[in-house]
Amino acid sequence: MMLSLRGINTYYGRAHILADVALEVAEGEVVVLLGRNGAGKSTTLKSIIGWVRPQRGEIAFDGRRIDRLPTWRIARAGLGYVPEDRRIFTDLSVMENLDVGHQRGGWSPERVLALFPNLAEARDRPASRISGGEQQMLAIARCLMGNPSCILMDEPSEGLAPVIVDQLAAAIRALKAAGVAMLLSEQNWRFASMVADRAYVIEKGRIRFSGTLAELAADAEARQRYLAV
């Protein structure tokens, strides 16, 4: 497995947010973590990348335990992170944002812009003057410039127009074809069904479902109970 969590328990102060969370992402696989607002999706990703420290449990990436490493070492090991608020540099141009994240390796600016044609057309424009969907693409593109083998994406489709969601789904499928593993936190069932191989459903900090997208699609009771779809 590229990424595995075992018995993760994370707290904010005295509040127990994640309880014995376990999940896996294989090499080149797209896995979606589904759940309502406040279910624990973002905290799961933050626990993996080191923004929040689990009090119990183990996280392994590419065969190495990472749950006690600083965030910069986790990133350098090849685990990328696209947070929900994107955190792009709005005063910099699209190309300058890409340059900030550039590391030697497989992903060049030209290759990234080929994946996101919208950004190629806006390459010299300040990031503050591109659309929300293009900003999401830029956040993913900048992450790719660090040459990750696995990417965590927090609510990548949130607030995007359907046509942009379709373009984002096509880009994620292309990344999968290129061998990049991904763990997405999502509420959008339609988007998840377009890109993911497997799904976990989290509710009140606990994993309530684990299986393929086809199995979740066939489980109307689980989707209604935990996702309201």
Image (cartoon, rainbow, N blue to C red):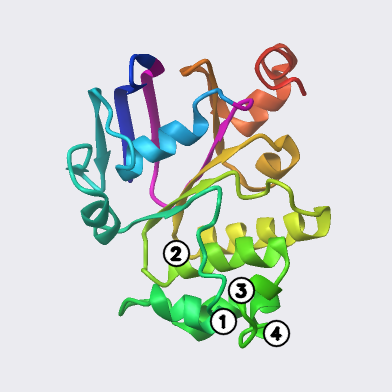
- Earlier in the chain: of badge 4 and badge 2, it is 4
Taking the image as shown, residue 29 lies to the left or right of residue 9, namely right
Specify few, some or many for label 1: CA neighbours under 10 Å numbering under 14, 14-19, or 20 or more: many
Amino acid type, mark 3? Ala
Q: In the rendering, at what x and y percent does residue 167 appear?
A: 72, 62
Amino acid type, mark 4? Glu
- Residue 133 magenta-drawn? no
Q: Which mark is residue 93?
A: 1
Taking the image as shown, residue 201 lies to the left or right of residue 56, namely right
Q: At numbered mark 2, what does the secondary structure look like: helix, strand or loop?
A: helix
- Earlier in the chain: of badge 4 and badge 3, it is 4
Q: Nearer the viewer, mark 4 or mark 1?
A: 1
* Residue depicted at 47% across the width and 69% down the height: 142
Specify few, some or many for label 2: CA neighbours under 10 Å numbering under 14, 14-19, or 20 or more: many
What residue is pinned by disc 3? Answer: 127
Is mark 1 in CB contact (under 8 Å) with mark 3? yes
What residue is pinned by disc 2? Answer: 143
Magenta stretch secondary structure, dominant: strand
Q: Residues under labels 2 and 3: Cα distance?
A: 15 Å
